[in-house]
Amino acid sequence: MIDMELLNYLEEFISENRKERFTEILRQRTNYITVAVEDVYQMHNTSAVVRSCESFGVQTAHLIEGKYGKRLDEEIAMGAQKWVDIKRYQNSKEAIDTLKNKGYKIVATSPHADSSLLQDFKLNGKTALFFGTEKNGLSDYVLENSDASLKIPMVGFTESLNISVSAAIILQHVTTQLKSSNIDWQLTEDELWERRLDWTKKSIKSIDEILKRYKSDNKKKD
């Protein structure tokens, strides 16, 4: 349950413009679509995918980092990691089990011949888009445990695109489709307030000191 008293207190430390911007952006956020990145080696690729999530309003990114460790570079992400919820996993099974338990359909992005073309892909329930490593793509485990697969149509000699480019193209397409549909895709009220509190905290430089003061003042009231 969100602590509205704390939120109201902290919002005194940010501008009205900031509060209005939070409200405006949060109205465009969704958890109906989410993204998972599997064991990407190049740090800049993971970071660029997180930037695309933020740009297209996808609130949560799931990073599978069992092989190469943490792959998020704050400079390349350009602050996007502050506004996107990052979930980390040691392996793909853990990520898929978690997402399926939350009701997500697992969609593998793959250039394989039997994949649906992006323009033919239709959202049918909550969707987790999986993106794989630079050279080999998604693991056999993800491909075997996915509910569907899709690919970007290409007409040149190149067989695949960089993961960050693929993610941007696919997210632009599916979020546009989502927002033009009758699907209830926006964040829930609880999610909205939770993000607003989190973003407000991240916008205050001396947040630790302010939180200590808030707790101290509340103890005195008790």
Image: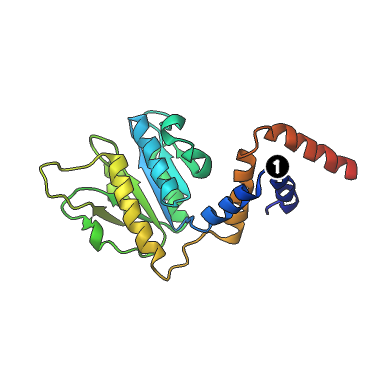
Where residue 36 appears, as percent x and y from the top left, is: 39, 45
Residue at 61% from the left image edge and 49% from the top image edge: 17
Q: Along the horizontal axis of the image, is 165 left or right of 187?
A: left
> Vertical placement of 103 versus 93: above or below?
below
Task: Pick the quarter of the image with the C terminus.
Answer: top right
Near-viewer residue (180 or 38): 180
> Vertical placement of 59 versus 80: above or below?
below
Q: How many marks?
A: 1
Residue at 40% from the left image edge and 36% from the top image edge: 47
Q: Do we see residue 57 in this rendering?
A: yes
Q: Amino acid at mark 1?
A: Phe
Where residue 75 appears, as percent x and y from the top left, is: 44, 30
Outermost residue, top direction? 68
Where residue 212 appears, as percent x and y from the top left, is: 76, 34
Residue that badge 1 annotates: 13
Near-viewer residue (186 or 76): 76
Label 1 Cα neighbours within 10 Å, binned few <14 / some 14-19 / many ≥20 = some
Question: Which of the 4 quarters of the picture holds residue 193?
Answer: bottom right
Where residue 182 appears, as percent x and y from the top left, is: 42, 71
Near-viewer residue (17 or 32): 17
